[in-house]
Image (spheres, rainbow, N blue to C red):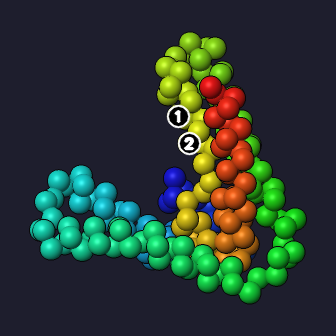
Amino acid sequence: MLPLLLALAESARGNGGTWQQVLRQSLLRLARNPLVLAVSAGLAISLAQVDLPQPVLRTVNLFAQASGGLSLFAIGGMLLGLPLRAGWQRVVPVVLGKLVGHPLAVLLVLTVVTALGVAPMEPQLRAAALLMAAMPMLSIYPILGQAYGEADRSATTLLLCMVASFFTLSAWMWMLR
């Protein structure tokens, strides 16, 4: 999903021109995006079933363990000095869409698919799908937004989403009991 979302963000960044020019510019920027390169390299290594040497595995594990704390540190730095009342009109719809709209859309799809008999699911799997949709966005959200000039807005959105998810997740779990 991340490469698809990055492609959409890149196409919105286009400087105009025909759709072919915008597509070409977007693909060129995506080809140089470190996140897309890392996902592509990881996929290639996984498909090739390459066994990485122990020092490389230890290094990757070290970065994986440190990344959570580092991302929270970066988000805190982005939030530092932001006025509390600025930009709430642009943040609240994103939070509501993520914490309420996304789970409702998943619930609708699960209901329709089950009603059509296409893919009956165990109740626990339905609940897990709904709760996964109700989770706040990943902590990488502000870091991705920074590349598009939206670091402040995305950090504020993530903060509000994390706080509000305490209430919305509790409500979803109560409704699923």
Q: Which mark is residue 87?
A: none
Numbered disc 2: secondary structure: helix
Q: Reply above or below: 66 against 158.
A: below
Amino acid type of the residue that numbered disc 2 sits on in the rendered structure:
Met
Foreground pick, 44 / 169 = 169
Left or right: where 151 falls relative to 45: right
Q: What residue sits right under mark 2 in the picture?
A: 132
Left or right: where 122 falls relative to 162: left
**What whole-number distance in Å separates the C-alpha atoms at marks 1 and 2?**
6 Å
Amino acid type of the residue that numbered disc 1 sits on in the rendered structure:
Ala
**Furthest residue to the bottom?**
81
Residue 12 in view here = no
How many other residues sit within 10 Å of disc 2, few (<14), some (14-19) or many (≥20)? some
How many other residues sit within 10 Å of disc 1, few (<14), some (14-19) or many (≥20)? few
Numbered disc 1: secondary structure: helix
Looking at the rendering, which quadrant does residue 163 occupy?
bottom right
Residue 172 in picture, x, y percent from top left: 68, 36
Left or right: where 143 falls relative to 155: left
Which quadrant: the C terminus? top right
Residue 164 in view here = yes
Q: What residue sits right under mark 1 in the picture?
A: 128
Residue 174 in picture, x, y percent from top left: 67, 32
Q: Identify the residue at image location x=72%, y=54%.
A: 164
Q: Identify the residue at image location x=55%, y=27%.
A: 126
Instruction: Please say if the residues under marks 1 and 2 sit with CB atoms less than 8 Å apart.
Output: yes
Foreground pick, 88 / 108 = 88
Residue 59 in picture, x, y percent from top left: 24, 74
Q: Identify the residue at image location x=60%, y=48%.
A: 135
Looking at the rendering, which quadrant does residue 64 occupy?
bottom left
Looking at the rendering, which quadrant does residue 8 occupy?
bottom right
Foreground pick, 118 / 68 = 68
Residue 124 in picture, x, y percent from top left: 50, 25
